[in-house]
Image: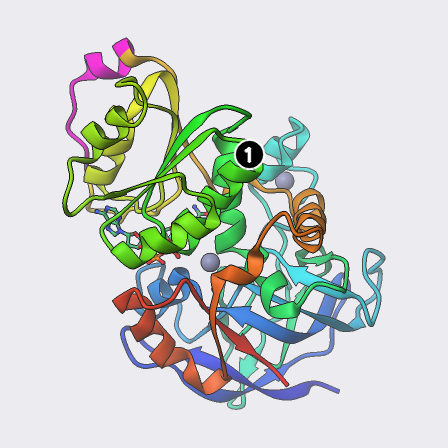
Amino acid sequence: MPYEVNGVVAAGKGAPVSVQKIIVPDPGPGEVVVRVQACGVCHTDLHYREGGINDEFPFLLGHEASGIVEVVGAGVTNVAPGDFVILNWRAVCGDCRACRKGKPWYCFNTFNASQPMTLASGQPLSNALGIGAFVEKTLVHAGQCTPVDRRVSPDVAGLLGCGVMAGLGAAINTGGVSRGDTVAVIGCGGVGSAAVAGARLAGAAKIIAVDVDQRKLEWAKDFGATDTVNARETDVVEAIQGLTDSFGADVVIDAVGRPETWKQAFYGRDLAGTVVLVGVPTPDMTLDMPLIDFFSRGGSLKSSWYGDCLPSRDFPMLVDLHLQGRLPLEKFVTERIGLGDVEQSFERMGRGDVLRSVVVFD
Ligand SMILES: NC(=O)c1ccc[n+]([C@@H]2O[C@H](COP(=O)([O-])OP(=O)(O)OC[C@H]3O[C@@H](n4cnc5c(N)ncnc54)[C@H](O)[C@@H]3O)[C@@H](O)[C@H]2O)c1
Ligand SMILES: [Zn+2]
Ligand SMILES: [Zn+2]
């Protein structure tokens, strides 16, 4: 029997989101129905609502979630009813050119559920990042479910499903931060703060947090920043150099994604260092820089998609580190809200009042 449940829908470009009845089909082969326990509000949900990702309205929003497997379809072997899982948007195919090269974290053909969830009218929904989890139950591909230790709190675990993983992975996986490194993180929202936490976990000696908002800088200290730079008051490149014997940092992470912040990252980096772009620019943004600077400064300029994570490898490991007290995931949760509060949480996100609002289900 299909399920009839409540979920948060973005019906049209820029229109406020609303709670609607959603029809969730029984799982087909390779599919799973998950009873969602918690789902964080990510900036990307707001991008969807604003039509910034594509025009395939109506969207079922939410994609940073954890929950309990309710029922599995034919042929599902990696999870069983009752398992506690984090949902991921990188269910690797094992067969594309990236997977075949042994780099599945770049998988170019990730799996989603093949049946649509619909409105009560029967109109199919587009799922945010192929998930759709501001809903009491959701239908996903089995590969989108990563079982983890169930002792972790669901609201905290769900954050690993997107933004926190993106930031941690930008530092640890993409940036390759290691013991003794100097690291700067530009933009310390949910993603940048996670990059700070990742740099600490990896043993960075100096972690410089940069933001235009003093509150974010205070929070960043709590995640392990050793120094802070307010970009409204100070020249960012000079400040980073001043804190690194005038050399620049080994790894600079741009968690804003604008031309000016990327340039700060580029020039705030030591010779042969690494720049990681994890913030997402808009299509109109361009760069105009001397080509000789790219050559003469060497090193690597990288982008980080979902923190180059491999959910089956990274989620259980990061949950274990959290349970051991070495990764304070709970500090990302600024507030717990209900399904009907998502629209207001977008406003709080815009004002910079929150690192993460998390929808929790009874
Ligand atoms: N690459 C990925 O896989 C991935 C995944 C999730 C999110 N993201 C992207 O990461 C970015 C950050 O997401 P978030 O959830 O942390 O957003 P957020 O809005 O919580 O944080 C952005 C932070 O940047 C700061 N900021 C803005 N302009 C700045 C400037 N000029 N200099 C310094 N700081 C500045 C803000 O004060 C804020 O603290 C977004 O672009 C988001 O789309 C990327
Ligand atoms: Zn693949
Ligand atoms: Zn997200």
Q: In the displayed image of the protein, which residue is found farthest to the top?
A: 296
Residue tagged 1: 173
Q: Residue at x 38, y 19 (%)?
A: 273
Q: In which image quadrant can residue 216 be found?
A: bottom left
Residue 290, magenta (yes or no)? yes
Q: Residue at x 20, y 12 (%)?
A: 292
Image quarter for ligand 2 equals top right
Image x and y of residue 157, in percent: 63, 61
Q: Residue at x 26, y 9 (%)?
A: 296
349 versus 246 height, above or below:
below
Position of the N terminus, as image quadrant, is bottom right
Q: Which residues are magenta?
A: 286-296
Q: In which image quadrant can residue 140 be found?
A: bottom right
Q: Residue at x 68, y 86 (%)?
A: 3
| Foreground residue among 88 and 265 | 265
**Does the image show residue 306?**
no
Image x and y of residue 270, in percent: 33, 18
Image x and y of residue 261, in percent: 24, 39
Q: In which image quadrant can residue 291 be found?
A: top left
**Mark 1 surroundings: few (<14), some (14-19) or many (≥20) residues within 10 A:** some
**Does the image show residue 72?**
yes
318 versus 120 height, above or below:
above
The kind of residue on which mark 1 rests is Asn
